Image (cartoon, rainbow, N blue to C red):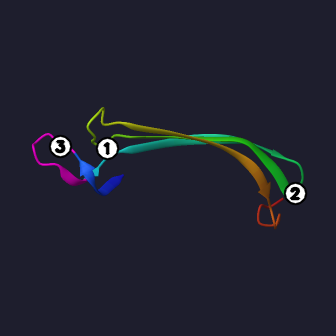
Amino acid sequence: MHGFDAYFPSDDAQPNGSANSLAFSTGGGVEIGFSDWLSVRTVEAEFLASHMPNDLSGRQRSLRVSSGLIFRFSSNVLNR
């Protein structure tokens, strides 16, 4: 990942305006189908971890959890 136009502290006295880091994301979910055109995604979760420099630990973690309805307008696209 690349961060820019922000404050990124560095080891020397001069802070940087940009930084690069390795980011890792993983996730998954459960979807229950009711018909060819309607299903419910009961849970979908994604975890994101990165290591951009900051004044604390230098690590950021984010967890996103969602759910919702899925409407399919063409089942031919999904080879059903």
Q: Which picture quadrant has residue 76?
A: bottom right
* Quadrant showing the C terminus: bottom right
N-terminal-most mark, 3 or 1:
3
What residue is pinned by disc 3? 10
- Depth check: 75 or 62 in front? 62
Mark 3 lies on a secondary structure that is loop
The outermost residue toward the right is 35
Mark 2 lies on a secondary structure that is loop
Q: Is residue 38 above or below residue 58?
A: below
- Within the magenta stretch, is there residue 29? no
Q: Amino acid at mark 2?
A: Asp
Q: Residue at x 10, y 42 (%)?
A: 12
What residue is pinned by disc 1? 52
Look at the image and give the residue range highlighted in magenta. Answer: 9-18
Q: Residue at x 74, y 49 (%)?
A: 68
N-terminal-most mark, 1 or 2:
2
Density class for disc 1 (Cα within 10 Å; few <14, some 14-19, many ≥20) is many
Residue 36 is labelled as 2
Residue 39 is labelled as none
- Within the magenta stretch, is there residue 10? yes
Density class for disc 2 (Cα within 10 Å; few <14, some 14-19, many ≥20) is some
Q: Position of residue 78 (x, y in %)?
A: 77, 61
Q: CA distance from mark 1 to mark 2?
A: 44 Å
N-terminal-most mark, 2 or 3:
3
Density class for disc 3 (Cα within 10 Å; few <14, some 14-19, many ≥20) is few
Q: Main secondary structure of the magenta part?
A: loop
Q: Position of residue 42 (x, y in %)?
A: 75, 41
Q: Amino acid at mark 1?
A: Met
Mark 1 lies on a secondary structure that is loop
